[in-house]
């Protein structure tokens, strides 16, 4: 049975789309047939991060309005056989998303795919509500700072109240926490919330911690999800996230300050 | 005897009056007909089934359903009817301009905002509603006029939980920006980081018990205290009880 996973956060700019792209890629690299949907209708970022922006002809809203078939709109990833992208429309707004339409598309996708990853827009308005409404699982992306944690808390409340599973009284959405842009050094200096602080406040299981890294920005600019970069700590951390999601016992990494050698300490970098 | 640890910041013996802000949760009476006779008939029927829940309760009159009605509602007659039924109308909302004018002349306030809910509140997660159902099936509680509401999952930012007519027990964290409200007392057996308002219908004997006190605001029967920065170190993260002594809000650690 296909699983619908929403990647959400409440706050903008915390790394939802970066996480969606790498998480979906990681699932596909492990042989799962995966589709990632951009729910940020009107802005459209996922196709850029996935490096397929020039191949967007039809989009999510075209399929919703029966202006194209799902097959026409799905873009096959060029690096990964099992991965497809359903891009957002840049010319419409989020009012184009209807519950019936989204449900129809998800049901159609469920026949072909193992995992459906929904990249939610920021905020708690219609786009975000539509992205989370049909979810079976939720990945809540949070930065280790107070306002991001507060917004994630808010979105967790909405998951527990306004999702289909909540309204139907079904088994609640399975929640996972992913902390991004983590800087152990600043945590040590007391300038940033620690993993434990965030975990304590949100009280949901931790799926992974992604360290702040320049490779994320360069990967986004190049249109290659950072999980493909085996040398990048962030890329490795996303691989860990996927393996934990698949139920493997992978210890947490990147939580502590790297030990610097004596020479490096004396001469700097 | 309890030792007093923190005094209410508002002790104003030299001033005769002081204006303060507070948040109250009031029941809403939605009026769907302009006929006083029909309202009277249905109201007494409803109140009979609601036991003494609403005795001497302040209510807000919602006019949404009749705001476009041609017929005029006789506010003075309505107020007489409500006070006969031991309800205290405080204001109206969602009325037309004309209705608002009539309401003001009848001595009612015009209230803005507020989302209409069926007693349980906005983002109350469904499993919490089920908890309530569970408690209703408990023979010890059935028939009681003050049912206890038990919440087992975290109360998150933006959520509001109201235990009407009784106590509220929360077994999971109450996060910053969340609000828990009860007509009775409040117990929180987990970190309390949000706002807690006990005795919102004026019961000064209600208390708040927190296992881990980090609240943003606590209030008993409208006497509140805001912790703007953080909770003072003597009580921070401690197990405390909060109660009224006269007009003064007392917070003392539980040993």
Image (cartoon, rainbow, N blue to C red):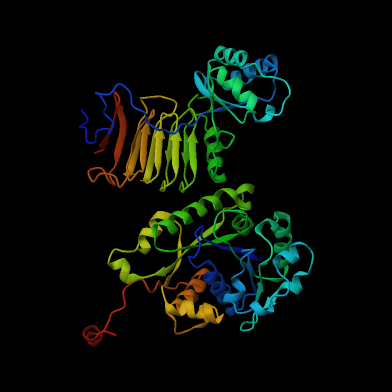
Question: Which residue: 47% across, 32% down?
Answer: B148
Question: Which residue: 52% across, 29% down?
Answer: B139
| Residue B196 seen from this side | yes
Dividing the picture into quarters, in which one does residue B94 lie? top right
Pinpoint residue B205: horizontal percent, then vertical percent.
35, 25
| Residue A235 seen from this side | no
Question: Which residue: 40% across, 71% down?
Answer: A252
Pinpoint residue B59: horizontal percent, then vertical percent.
54, 24
Where's the N terminus of chain B, which quadrant?
Answer: top left
Q: Which of A57 and A142 is in front in this view?
A: A57
Dividing the picture into quarters, in which one does residue A38 lie? bottom right
Horizontal relation, residue B103 to residue B202: left or right: right
Where's the C terminus of chain B, which quadrant?
Answer: top left
Pinpoint residue A218: horizontal percent, then vertical percent.
49, 80
Question: Which residue: 41% across, 33% down?
Answer: B22
Labels in figure, total: 0
Pinpoint residue A27: horizontal percent, then vertical percent.
58, 74
Residue B237, compared with residue A263, is above or below; it is above
Horizontal relation, residue A129 to residue B139: left or right: right
Horizontal relation, residue A102 to residue B7: left or right: right
Q: Nearer the viewer, residue B100 or A185?
A: B100
């Amino acid at each position: 049975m296909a699983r619908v996973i929403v990647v959400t956060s409440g706050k903008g700019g915390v790394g939802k789309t970066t996480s969606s792209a790498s998480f979906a890629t990681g699932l596909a690299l492990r042989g799962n047939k995966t589709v990632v949907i951009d729910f940020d209708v009107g802005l459209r970022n996922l196709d850029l991060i996935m490096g397929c922006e020039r191949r967007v002809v039809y989009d999510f809203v075209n399929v919703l309005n029966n202006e194209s078939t799902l097959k026409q709109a799905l873009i096959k990833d060029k690096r990964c056989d099992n991965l497809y992208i359903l891009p957002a429309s840049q010319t419409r707004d989020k009012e184009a998303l209807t519950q019936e339409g989204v449900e129809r598309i998800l049901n159609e996708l469920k026949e072909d795919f193992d995992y459906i990853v929904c990249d939610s827009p920021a905020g708690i308005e219609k786009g975000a509500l539509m992205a989370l409404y049909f979810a079976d699982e939720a990945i809540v992306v949070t930065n280790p700072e107070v306002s991001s944690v507060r917004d994630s808390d808010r979105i967790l409340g909405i998951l527990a109240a306004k999702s289909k599973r909540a309204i139907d009284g079904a088994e609640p959405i399975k929640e996972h926490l992913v902390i991004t842009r983590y800087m152990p050094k600043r945590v040590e200096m007391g300038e940033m919330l620690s993993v434990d602080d965030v975990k304590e406040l949100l009280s949901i299981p931790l799926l992974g911690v992604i360290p702040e890294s320049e490779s994320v920005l360069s990967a986004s600019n190049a249109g290659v999800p950072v999980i493909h970069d085996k040398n990048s700590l962030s890329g490795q951390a996303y691989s860990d996230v996927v393996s934990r999601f698949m139920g493997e016992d992978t210890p947490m990494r990147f939580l502590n300050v790297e030990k610097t050698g004596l020479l490096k300490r004396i001469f700097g970098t | 005897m309890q030792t007093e640890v923190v005094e209410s910041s508002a002790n104003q013996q030299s001033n005769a009056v002081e204006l303060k802000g507070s948040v109250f949760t009031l029941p809403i009476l939605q009026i769907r007909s302009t006929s006083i006779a029909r309202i009277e008939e249905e109201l007494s029927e409803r109140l009979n089934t609601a036991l003494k829940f609403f005795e001497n309760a302040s209510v807000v009159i919602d006019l949404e359903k009749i705001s476009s009605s041609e017929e005029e509602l006789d506010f003075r007659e309505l107020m007489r009817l409500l006070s006969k039924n031991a309800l205290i109308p405080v204001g109206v909302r969602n009325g037309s301009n004309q209705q608002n004018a009539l309401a003001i002349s009848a001595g009612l306030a015009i209230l803005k905002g507020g989302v209409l809910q069926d007693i349980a509140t906005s983002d109350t997660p469904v499993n919490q509603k089920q908890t309530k159902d569970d408690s209703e099936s408990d023979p010890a509680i059935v028939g009681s006029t003050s049912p206890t509401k038990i919440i087992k999952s975290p109360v998150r930012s933006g959520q509001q939980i109201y235990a009407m007519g009784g106590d509220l027990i929360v077994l999971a964290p109450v996060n910053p920006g969340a609000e828990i409200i009860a007509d009775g007392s409040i117990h929180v057996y987990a970190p309390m980081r949000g706002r807690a308002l006990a005795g919102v219908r004026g019961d000064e004997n209600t208390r708040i018990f927190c296992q881990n006190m980090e609240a943003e605001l606590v209030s008993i029967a409208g006497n509140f205290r805001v912790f703007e920065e953080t909770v003072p170190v003597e009580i921070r993260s401690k197990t405390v009880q909060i109660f009224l002594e006269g007009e003064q809000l007392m917070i003392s650690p539980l040993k």
